[in-house]
Amino acid sequence: MIPDQEGPATPNGADRFDDEHYPAYTMGRAADMLGATQGFLRSLDEAGLITPQRSAGGHRRYSRHQLRLAARVRELVDQGTAVDAACRIVTLEDQLHEAHRVNAELRAEN
């Protein structure tokens, strides 16, 4: 849910369409979208890059944000980078992007 959004405290299904952190994708669908194997996605979980949420039945569910990170790792792995190193690179890239976003917000306030 978007912070400071007016309306019900619990978002309904339509409110989640724009939420990039909503775990909307099953493991099979996520793997298909990435052109990767389900084992590749499990390896990203084991490396600590992404931790998918679990459905009531215990199935992994991925968000768009997690799939973007996984896609970037996939690019690096396809270029010959080891999975663990690719995960570290992507983590640092994601942290840098977030720091730039926060800095831009702070500058806009002044």
Image (cartoon, rainbow, N blue to C red):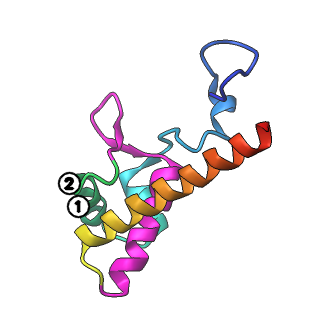
Question: The disc labelled 1 sits on which kind of residue?
Answer: Ser
- In this rendered view, identify the residue nearer to me: 101 or 42: 101
- On residue 43, the disc is 1
Q: How many labels does the image show?
A: 2
Q: In this view, does 40 lie to the left or right of 105?
A: left
Spot occupied by residue 42 in the image (x, y as percentages of width and height):
25, 57
Q: In which quarter of the image is the N terminus?
A: top right
Name the quadrant containing residue 54.
top left
Residue positioned most to the top: 8
Q: Look at the image and say whether residue 59 sits in the magenta stretch.
A: yes
| Residue displayed at 33% across by 79% down | 77
Q: Is residue 24 above or below residue 82?
A: above
Graded by Cα atoms within 10 Å as few (under 14), some (14 to 19) or many (20 or more), the crowding at tag 1 reads: some
Q: Mark 2 points at which residue?
A: 46
| Residue displayed at 46% across by 54% down | 95
Spot occupied by residue 57 in the image (x, y as percentages of width and height):
29, 32
Q: In this view, does 9 lie to the left or right of 7?
A: left
Q: In which quarter of the image is the C terminus?
A: top right
Q: Look at the image and say whether residue 12 sits in the magenta stretch.
A: no
Residue positioned most to the bottom: 79
User: Element under label 2?
Assistant: helix
Q: Distance between the residues labelled 2 and 1?
A: 5 Å
Spot occupied by residue 27 in the image (x, y as percentages of width and height):
36, 53
- In this rendered view, identify the residue nearer to me: 29 or 52: 52
The answer to whether the residues at label 2 and label 1 have Cβ atoms under 8 Å apart is yes
Q: In this view, does 73 lie to the left or right of 58?
A: right
| Residue displayed at 45% across by 69% down | 72
Segment colored magenta: 51-80
User: Element under label 1?
Assistant: helix
Q: Is residue 40 above or below residue 27?
A: below
